[in-house]
Image (tube, rainbow, N blue to C red):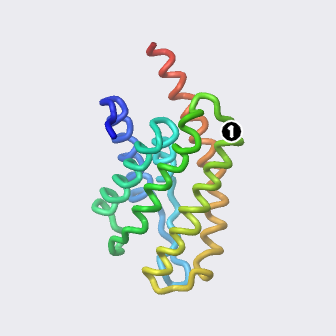
Amino acid sequence: MTFSTKTATNVGLLVAVSIILTRVLGVVIPVGGVMALRLSFGEIPLILAGVLFGPAAGAVAGASSDLIGFMVNSHGGPYFPGFTVSAVLTGMLPGLFLYPRRHTFSLTQLLAVIFLTDMITGVLLNTLWLSVMMDTGFWVLLPPRVVSRLATIPVYTAVVYLTRRAYQASQLRTL
């Protein structure tokens, strides 16, 4: 897996934005006495890395943002590798589905991929990791996490769609 200098630079910038959105601007809300719900928009740059530069770039962005982000601000918790797996999948899955059609996919296709990715990683896996880490019931943590994710999915979709269009327009101008 090799990246061009341009791709590596862009992915690095997306990692930095993800860290800022997640670790600095994110808000952690306790659920059932456990810090189980973080509201942030840090997944957007990971999704963009996968959609714009491919599944490998999305996976690298996810792993890098989680590992470096933990070193920047752990939110008081221990490191747990399950969250790194979730971050890798958050960048990789949209790239697997949409990168081959990055110039032609529709808003509906993007919404479906973001919904699927977020339900797998943000809802199921991250809730599982939290329940294991905090020794709290999965079903106790699940409802507020589903509600928060359903509220963020349309925002993620709109931002990724508009950013992809702006990026493609900038690429056409530089040719």
Between 156 and 28, the residue placed more toward the observer is 156
Circle 1 is placed at which residue position?
A: 107
Q: Count the marks: how many?
A: 1
Task: Choose between 139 and 166: the one closer to the eye.
Answer: 139
Tell me if 103 is positioned left or right of 79 in this view.
Answer: right
At x 51% / y 48%, what residue is drawn?
44
Coordinates of residue 91 in the picture (x, y in percent):
47, 49
Assess disc 1: are there few (<14), some (14-19) or many (≥20) residues with their C-alpha within 10 Å of its C-alpha.
some
Amino acid at circle 1: Leu
Which quarter of the figure is the N terminus placed in? top left
Up-down relation of residue 138 to residue 25 (above or below): below
Q: Is residue 15 left or right of residue 39?
A: left
* Residue that appears at 51% across and 77% down: 30
* Mark 1 element type: helix
| Image spot of residue 85 (x, y percent) | 43, 62
Tell me if residue 140 comes above or below residue 121 in the rendering: below
In this view, 148 is above or below 136: above
